[in-house]
Image (cartoon, rainbow, N blue to C red):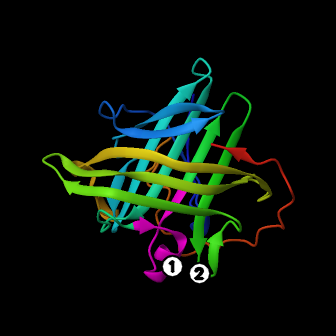
Amino acid sequence: MKRMLAMLLCLCLLALGAALSEGAAGDGIVLTLDGQPMHLSFDRSDAYSSVMNGNVQASFFAYANGDQTIYELYMVFPENVRGGDEVTPAYAMQGAMESSVVLIITDNQDETYYFAGQIDTGAYPEGSDYNIHFDTVADTAGGTRYEGRLSATMVGMEMSSGALLGSLQISDAPFSFTMPAENRRTVTDAPEATPDQSPNPFDPAPELTPAPLPEATPQQTYRV
């Protein structure tokens, strides 16, 4: 099943991807879906998890329903975070930093995108929020180790029309992963997009500006 990469809403980017690569045993994030815990593995491939231009993009994934559904979570946060830091929309706007949380749920019929980010005027989409709390950040022989918890209110969006869907809640989801040292790169050495590999979907695109979102209509709220 072809893998879709997330769009950072405040930059209006959408990218496609393909191959999955397994993270180290135990590396990942635990979400609660329909009352059941689900472990999403950290994807250590530099096509999906990387450090570039002062930002970290961490990718997690899991298959479900007999491999018919894939869950993908992306966290983007500043490279200079330390243990005890909390990355929030206010934190990001105060320092003009890039950060966001994106969840994509894909099955044979649909691809549903949920976002939490920010633009200059506040949270984007409206009503979204997130808190990436880092318990520890430590340099290791193989890279940088991050451990912490993620909470977020994520707003669904229909990608073609921009229509808002229901919201989705993530509460104190524990994560831990080691970003490999070799996944650090610059814009000049970032891989070019191919049908099976896409660049970092959160790279800046100054020529694009977010279009105003339509007013949200009441929808069902999902809790994760």
Q: Secondary structure at mark 1?
A: helix
Figure check: 184 above or below 55: above
Residue occupying image coordinates x 66% and y 48% = 113
- Viewer-closest of 141 and 170: 170
Q: Which residue is mark 2?
A: 120
- Farthest top residue? 66
Q: Which residue is mark 1?
A: 93
Q: Secondary structure at mark 2?
A: loop
- Looking at the image, is mark 1 or mark 2 earlier in the sequence? 1
Q: Which residues are magenta?
A: 86-101
* Quadrant placement of the C terminus: top right
**Label 2: how many residues lie within 10 Å, few (<14), some (14-19) or many (20+)?**
few
Left or right: residue 42 compared with residue 222: left
Spot occupied by residue 210 in the image (x, y as percentages of width and height) = 67, 71
Image marks 1 and 2: residues in contact by CB distance under 8 Å: yes
**Residue 71 visible in the shown view:** yes
What kind of residue is marked 1?
Met
Determine if the magenta segment contains residue 93.
yes
- Viewer-closest of 117 and 200: 117
Spot occupied by residue 7 in the image (x, y as percentages of width and height) = 58, 56
Figure check: 64 above or below 76: above
Spot occupied by residue 8 in the image (x, y as percentages of width and height) = 56, 61
**Label 1: how many residues lie within 10 Å, few (<14), some (14-19) or many (20+)?**
some
Residue occupying image coordinates x 49% and y 50% = 74
